[in-house]
Image (cartoon, grey):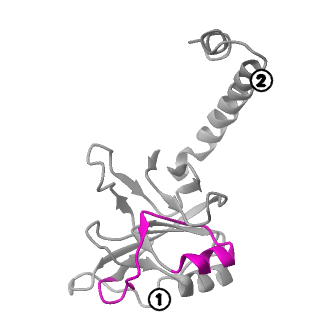
Amino acid sequence: MGATCPVSSNDEGVAKVCGPAFTVKMVSQQDTEAPKPDRHFVDAAQPGSVMVVAAPSEMRSAIWGGLMTARAQHLGVRGVVLDGRCRDLEEHRDAKFPVFARGHSTLGQSPFTRPSELQVPVTIRDPTSPSFPALTVHPGDAVLADIDGVVVVPAHLVDQVLALAAKSRDVDEKCMRDLRNGHGVQETFAKWRGK
């Protein structure tokens, strides 16, 4: 399990998305040896999925724009997480389509990057924080993204993580209740978290 950070939601913090990962690996346009998909990567996306698109970290161009959002939304894709940049922010907002990206750019994708492989493991690294561990996303892993960031849970751990999350949520609700009723943090955490 892991998380990527930082991310920026272009939907002013109200976007939330959850679903199985549909992965896309991008490479530099100059890379003539990497494979090429037999169709456009968005056309291959599966309904109900969250697309996870990984671009080379040095790329400053966008890898996603409004046209991609229009097609993905039509296909029933729930949202997209970009290890790269996006453009056409107003179009994503107007479509109410969740897009989480490292940043934005006015430059389009095609002169700089191209899709290479679909539904393969992709590795996401935070270029601004080398000490933050890399995260590998496999097709079908559970992706949850909101204003706080992006979390990826390996598919085989989803049930276990859901059980732990339910337990943690219950404890946090009890802590919040006590804190709002005037109890101290140390006292509250000792009571509910055992710390």
Position of residue 193 relative to residue 4, above or below, is above
Amino acid type for the residue under numbered disc 1: His
Instruction: Decide: few, some or many residues near mark 2? Use Cα within 10 Å; few <14, some 14-19, many ≥20.
Output: few
Residue at x 39%, y 63% (from the top left corner): 121
Viewer-side residue, 163 vs 50: 50
Q: In the visual, does 84 lie left or right of 52?
A: left
Residue at x 57%, y 55% (from the top left corner): 145
Q: Which mark is residue 177?
A: 2
Q: Which residue is mark 1?
A: 40
Q: Are marks 1 and 2 in contact (CB under 8 Å)?
A: no
Amino acid type for the residue under numbered disc 2: Arg
Instruction: Decide: few, some or many residues near mark 1? Use Cα within 10 Å; few <14, some 14-19, many ≥20.
Output: few
Q: Position of residue 40 (x, y in %)?
A: 47, 88
Q: Which residues are magenta?
A: 88-113
Viewer-side residue, 14 vs 170: 14
Q: Within the magenta stretch, is there residue 3?
A: no
Q: Position of residue 150 (x, y in %)?
A: 52, 53
Dot in front, 1 or 2: 2
Q: Is residue 43 visible?
A: no
Position of residue 167 relative to residue 82, above or below, is above
> In terms of image quadrants, where is residue 123?
bottom left
Q: In the visual, does 71 lie left or right of 36?
A: right
Residue at x 30%, y 89% (from the top left corner): 111
Kindly report the distance in space between the C-alpha atoms of the residues bearing marks 1 and 2: 50 Å
Q: Which mark is residue 183?
A: none
Position of residue 94 relative to residue 148, above or below, is below
Q: Position of residue 195 (x, y in %)?
A: 56, 12
